[in-house]
Amino acid sequence: FWITKDGLVVLASEVGVLDIPQERVLRKGRLQPGKMFLVDLDAGRIIEDDEIKDSLAKTAPYGEWLHAGMVRLEDIPAREHIFYPHSSVLRRQRAFGYTEEEIRLIITPMARTGAEPIGSMGTDTPVAVLSEKPRLLFDYFSQLFAQVTNPPLDAIREELVTSLGGSIGPEHNLLDPGPASCRQISLDFPVIDNDQLAKIINVNADGTHPGLSAYVVRGLFQIAEGGDGLRERIEEIRSEVSQAIKDGARIIVLSDRDGDGENAPIPSLLLTAAVHHHLIREKTRTKVGLVVESGEVREVHHVALLIGYGAAAVNPYLAMESAEDLVLQGVITDISTEKAVYNLIKSLGKGVLKVMSKMGISTIASYTGAQVFEALGLSQELIDEYFVGTTSRLGGVGLNVIAEETIKRHHIAYPPGGEIPNTKRLPIGGEYQWRRDGEPHLFDPETVFALQHATRSKRYDIFKRYTTRIDEQSKALMTLRGLFTFKEGVRSPIPIEEVEPIAEIVKRFSTGAMSYASALNQIREKVAKIQIATSH
């Protein structure tokens, strides 16, 4: 911003928007992260950030309210920690669709290092709606990001203005603050471990924290009822939550624990969004905080989605029990089970912060319920009922298919024909790396071999074999573009003599936008030769 000597204030995205002589400029500055810039037209002056906050802070005894009302999780009595045997962990991993690949490439690195594993080059597997595998509902959503020249927020260099800390509980009228506005449980992280969840569930068990009672919802549905049973159970839960609020509950825990051969877990994202939007319609959403206890959650994307659709905190209990099991089984060495769980929470939290920063969002409170996602392959009926306001450019599956995929995953742990041996391993996976029985890849061993063989032997017939295989995979429901066909007989073909010759087209080729840092020397030299040749 610029302030001139005659009282003109210019606030713009960049310098030079208006042609103002430098001798007229009294002051130059910028809008800083976390600070306010106020031009008070009534007072005829600019009020600085410190003065604004100081005057607001003196309007009410906020410090006293916080001290008396805010409950820190550390101050709630601890509950006994429960370790689960390997057989129990393995069975529930099967029920929630875990694979050996996810354990090896996702959970183990996070539990060991405290950082989210990073991959590259995108994915060449089918999108969830085209996959023949029973995919998680999370896979039908993609994250949105601010498409601007500069990153909207650098979560590393601008860490000072970011926060993963939040609170759980009722939210009172912002325009009429009072002591009750501070009656919440503060959290340092949106991801909580099993012991912290136990504290929240029993926060008022001894009557020491009135106004913060928690209510646990059993998020399961009967397998035999299929999609209709799932739909009916969601409606039952909505009514159950509404009644719990009337009875005084101020924290709702949506849990998918205790599934068995007859009851499967409702997808946590579906349940969270369904309850969230139901309470918004009832105008009771601010009366409660939502906590999700789910065995499905094991990736950053999963946590981000749950928070984005209304959860104030997420407890990925099975991922944490899996991390503990990896230590107890000797897969992860040199750290304790407590450290493994801490590392998992840390990596998930850092990942959520990275996702938030892509949209320029700096605090978890602003991200909660923001719904900055796009759906791909969900029916409009499903979107309108459970994911209101979510962008969806492609229709697809409804509640019946979601129930069917959930039941397929559940049958891996509870097969209709009876028990499975505990010695049987998890499904291999194949989402990140090609496996014979896993998710199909566009670039499988046969395709890669054909491409390498064609380039080494310089044989066009083998290259055509490679392109034909790629085209066949696209048509076999591997990609969305494979679903498109050309309309015939709509337009007359253009005579070839009217098409610009190749020799003229290549003159306009430019390699200036190529990422030279990612190319080998041989590639750079080849590009340079092509550029020189085409310029002549």
Image (cartoon, grey):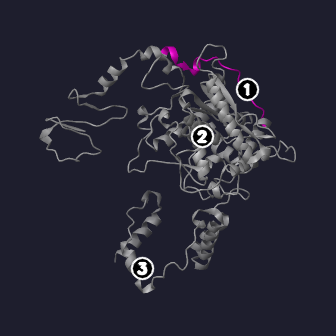
Q: Give amino acid for label 3.
A: Ile
Whether residue 418 is in magenta: the answer is: no
Q: Which residue is mark 3?
A: 502
Q: Which residue is mark 1?
A: 82
Instruction: Tell me the tag on residue 433.
Output: none
Label 2 environment density (alpha carbons within 10 Å; few <14, some 14–19, many ≥20)? many
Mark positioned earlier in the residue sequence (2 or 1): 1
In the image, taking residue 411 as reference, residue 73 lies left or right, namely left
Secondary element at tag 3: helix
Label 3 environment density (alpha carbons within 10 Å; few <14, some 14–19, many ≥20)? few
Task: Give the alpha-carbon distance from disc 2 to disc 1, as whole Å.
Answer: 29 Å
Instruction: Please say if 63 is above or below 154.
Output: above
Quarter placement of the C terminus: bottom left
Q: Residue 73: x percent and y percent?
A: 58, 21
Label 1 environment density (alpha carbons within 10 Å; few <14, some 14–19, many ≥20)? few
Task: Give the alpha-carbon distance from disc 1 to disc 3, as whole Å.
Answer: 70 Å
Which region shows up in magenta?
Answer: 67-86
Q: Which residue is mark 2?
A: 273
Q: Give amino acid for label 2.
A: Ala
Quarter of image, res 340 = top right
In percent of the image, x 32 and y 20: which residue is there?
Answer: 55
Mark positioned earlier in the residue sequence (1 or 3): 1
In the image, taking residue 112 as reference, residue 519 lies left or right, namely left
